[in-house]
Image: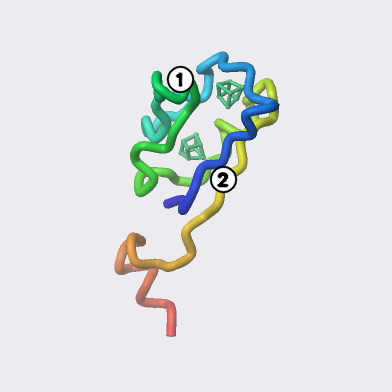
């Protein structure tokens, strides 16, 4: 899960490729803002494919470390 998907608008080329790269369909295109948005942040697995293949290197992913959305199996190990 990510807390935030930041897109540097100065670097973004509006190619929309990030919406296609994400296999979990986390990213959608916001027509009003003319920018990518993380609609389903809880489904992000932090594979970094969107950031790696972004031609403008415009994407920054901020992970969510709160554990509240992570599976109980992972949370069990946390004291
Ligand atoms: S892949 Fe990068 S440059 Fe293309 S729309 Fe997404 S953020 Fe913008
Ligand atoms: S890091 Fe992976 S799962 Fe998360 S938004 Fe990017 S492509 Fe999708």
| Front one among 30 and 24 | 30
Residue mark closest to the camera, 2 vs 1: 2
Report whether the residue tagged 2 is closer than 8 Å to ligand 2. yes
Q: Residue at x 62, y 29 (%)?
A: 9
Please give the count of numbered marks on the rendered protein: 2
Does residue 32 sit above or below 1 in this rendering? above
- Residue 53 in the figure: left or right of residue 65: right
For residue 20, the mark is 1
In the image, what residue occupies the spot 63% across and 17% down? 13
How far from the left and from the top, in percent, is residue 35? 49, 25
Residue in the picture at 53% in, 18% down: 17
Camera-nearest residue between 53 and 16: 16
Residue 57 placement: quadrant: top right
Identify the image quadrant of residue 61: top right
In the rendered image, the residue lying farthest to the front is 32
Residue 32: name its quadrant: top left
Residue of label 2? 61
Considering every residue shown, the one lying at the far left of the view is: 72
Task: Name the foreground residue: 17 vs 77.
Answer: 17
Give the class, few, some or many, for how many residues have Cα within 10 Å of label 1's Cα (few <14, many ≥20): few
């Amino acid at each position: 899960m990510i807390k935030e998907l930041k897109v540097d608008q100065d670097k973004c080329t509006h190619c929309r490729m990030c919406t296609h790269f994400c296999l979990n369909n986390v990213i959608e295109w916001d027509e009003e803002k003319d920018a990518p948005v993380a609609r389903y942040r809880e489904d992000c697995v932090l594979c970094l494919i969107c950031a790696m293949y972004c031609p403008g290197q415009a994407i920054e992913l901020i992970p969510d470390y709160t554990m509240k959305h992570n599976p109980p199996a992972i949370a069990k190990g946390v004291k």
